[in-house]
Amino acid sequence: MISTVEALKDLVAKAREAQCVALDTEFVWEDTYYPKLGIIQLGWSKTECYLIDAVAIGDLSPLGDLLADAHTVKILHDAQQDLWILKHATGVTACRIFDTRCAAGFAGMSSTLSLSNLLRMCINVQLPKTETRTDWLQRPLSDEQLEYALDDVRYLPALRTHLLAAVKQRGRDAWLSDELTLYDNESLYDDRDPDVQYQRVKGIGRLSRHELAVVRELAAWREAEAKVRDVPRNRVLSDEAFLEIARRKPKALDAFQRLRRVSERDVSRYGEVLVSAVKRGLELDENACPPASDNNRPNPVDDARLDLAMAFMRGRSLSERVDIGLVAARSDVKDLVAHGEAGKHSRLLSGWRYEFLGADLLALLSGKNAIGVDPQTQLPTLVIERNPT
């Protein structure tokens, strides 16, 4: 177990000599705003695996030298959350990431497979599940817990080799490389803008624009308060309380005391802040308020076009064995259907997704081509009209 800054520096120097290294984290995230790191696993072969004691080492910044090293591939499974945690711990955004979960989606498998299932399917390794409820902040950790943690990186280099071969055999290596470059985007690991946190509040779909503005003010305040107190957001004030405040629009402290979802303690602690948030939201010009959900009646033509596009995406993904979860979300397809090439948010308009699906979907939706059925797979396929020669 690496438990001093000097030992960590030595380990990082050694790791940077390797062509690629495996990384994982173990943390506890129940009573705090940010996860509390317990263990960081690091290794580059079955026998050269190490555990970094994040509890004992106050300064994890030396690990940032490895994360930022453009010559060393960092292998992780389901990388984004770990990389966000490591950025918070080191202040550094990692580069040259290989996400085994992502790679599986280009290798004819699901991109949502757990590491345990992926190892079993690819290299016939069965991981034990004995320590899934471990408190990784406790000390000392048992030998069983330490071995369990090491197993999460022990086989990742071999898994990467297997997946790369499978992806290359399918001719998808350029697509995988294209997708993995997205992990280098620093903004991917930034904290969310407090002014958009209202979008995560459950149940806002029926609120008016001014009611949404109130929720936006409340959610931005809650984000700052939770961060300062280092507690989960809902430990400050619940989403249900936000909805009740937005609908009832209390403008004075005594009005807050009549709300079911806001306790006397909440009013005593936050009352003036809540009154101010409601006032700011209600006084905004409507054009400055968040847009309300589109509650118009469904358009049968638009719905049919979206269903057609989704069916084509499912058919193309299944026939080509590229995991549909990697290709696009329904919202991406909906944006493409609604706006075509002018769409601003659809991922289907760039990179490998455009080559794989986006260009053909645009052609289909323009009415120039038609859907047929592949006689072998019985899946939807695009019939391209060609001029006779």
Image (cartoon, rainbow, N blue to C red):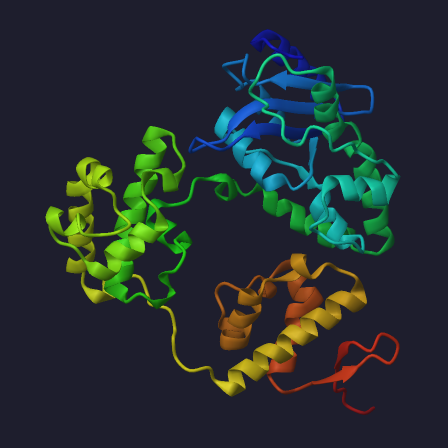
Residue 68: in sight, yes or no?
Answer: no
Q: Is residue 327 left or right of residue 346?
A: right
Q: Is residue 241 left or right of residue 157?
A: left
From this view, report whether residue 164 is shown above or below residue 54.
below
Q: Is residue 217 left or right of residue 80?
A: left
Give the quadrant of residue 337.
bottom right
Residue 187: in sight, yes or no?
Answer: yes
Give the quadrant of residue 313.
bottom right
Q: Tell me what residue is drawn at x 16 percent, y 48 percent.
A: 275
From this view, report whether residue 276 is shown above or below residue 210.
above
Q: Tell me what residue is drawn at x 67 percent, y 14 percent.
A: 11
Relative image position of residue 73 (x, y in whole percent): 70, 33
Relative image position of residue 162 (x, y in whole percent): 85, 41
| Quadrant that contains the N terminus | top right
Badge count: 0
Relative image position of residue 200 (x, y in whole percent): 42, 52
